[in-house]
Amino acid sequence: TAPARDRLRIAIQKNGRLAEPARSLLTACGLSWRQSRDKLFCYGESLPVDLLLVRDDDIPGLIADGVCDFGIVGRNELDEQGAARRRIGLPDAYQALRGLNFGQCRLMLAVPEEWEWTGVEQLAGKRIATSYPAILADWLAERGVDAQVVELSGSVEIAPRLGTADLICDLVSSGATLAANQLKPVETLLESEAVLAGPVRTPDDARAGLMAMLLRRLDGVVKVQD
Ligand code: PRT
Ligand code: ZN
């Protein structure tokens, strides 16, 4: 177990889609930081709450290892790493505590425009390119579909044209990327948004009170979706 700490650490994305909205949200909760020189760690001024600026992919692991207490990350990333842990028999190590009402997108299956989509049975024997192999494998298994998952870390949408896959499973927001690649969305695996992630067990030290306070402030600041 990680050692006791009297300051809270929150991991947020350093650069990218969630970086600015995550920082604004925490600022709206009354947090402020001394600008750090190395730009990885920001020391909390108004409250003992520090920021770690990292790649979004690292956030679930930082919570699992007890290095950070909270993180702001897409539900897609949190669920993928959670599903991957479960597939190798590891226990759950983090959970989504609050939806934050930004970073909305969908994890979807998309097929070449000329396909006539008749349902998941059509996927038998097909190759599906994705950066979300664990979520996709679970989804296929639940439906009893035997398809091949091709893991790609980026540029998933060009895989069908390159011939490395027959279809894709990727994040979609406006749909413009799919259209530009002559693909059409056919099934939604996950409705995602940025979430506040935390550990499955609250630490038993000064951080517990800070965590509860921050959750209360968040609930006052995040607008509920109707
Ligand atoms: O460097 P780092 O690893 O931290 O960043 P990253 O490149 O992995 O993540 P980033 O900043 O691209 O995305 C962070 C999070 O934003 C994601 O994990 C999602 O939770 C959320 N999000 C919301 C999105 C999108 N919308 C989105 N549209 N993430 C990615 N996309 C991509 C998608 O993969 C596709 O390539 O945008 C393209 C589709 O967009 P449309 O509008 O053309 O449909
Ligand atoms: Zn990433």
Image (spheres, helix red, strand yellow):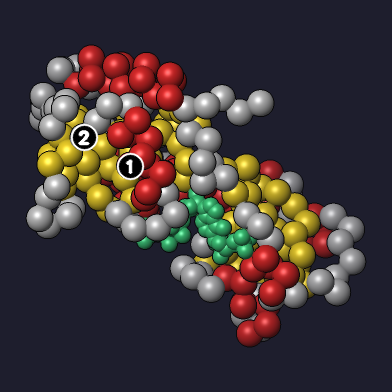
Q: Residue 130 location in percent, x, y? A: 57, 64
Asked whether, in this view, residue 98 is left or right of residue 56, the answer is right
Task: Examine the rendering and report whether any part of residue 103 can be seen.
Answer: yes
Residue shown at the point (41%, 44%) measured from the top left: 21
Query: In the displayed structure, does residue 68 sit left or right of residue 183?
Result: left
Q: Position of residue 143 (x, y in %)?
A: 74, 47
Q: Quadrant of residue 26?
A: top left
Q: Position of residue 207 (x, y in %)?
A: 19, 21
Position above or below: 135 against 51: below
Residue placed at 72% from the left, 70% from the top? 179
Q: Residues within 10 Å of mark 2 (few under 14, many from 20)?
A: many
State the image quarter where residue 192 is shown: top right
Q: Earlier in the sequence, mark 2 or mark 1?
A: 1
Number of numbered tags placed on the structure image: 2
Return the residue at label 1.
23
| Percent position of residue 30, x then y | 27, 26
For the C terminus, the image quarter is: top right
Given residues 111 and 43, the one toward you in this image is 43
Classify residue 68 as left or right of residue 191: left
Callout 2 amino acid:
Ser
For badge 1, the amino acid type reads: Arg
Residue at image position (75%, 59%) is 185
Q: Is mark 2 within 8 Å of ligand 1?
A: no
Using a 10 Å C-alpha cutoff, classify the residue at mark 1 as few (fewer than 14 neighbours), some (14 to 19) or many (20 or more): some
Q: Is residue 93 in view?
A: no
Residue drawn where x is 62% and y is 72% of the image: 157
- Per the image, label 1 sits on a secondary structure element best described as helix
Distance from disc 2 to disc 1, alpha carbons, whole Å, reads: 9 Å
Relative height, residue 151 to residue 84 (above, below):
below
**Quadrant where the N terminus is found in the figure:** top left
Per the image, the residue denoted by label 2 is 32
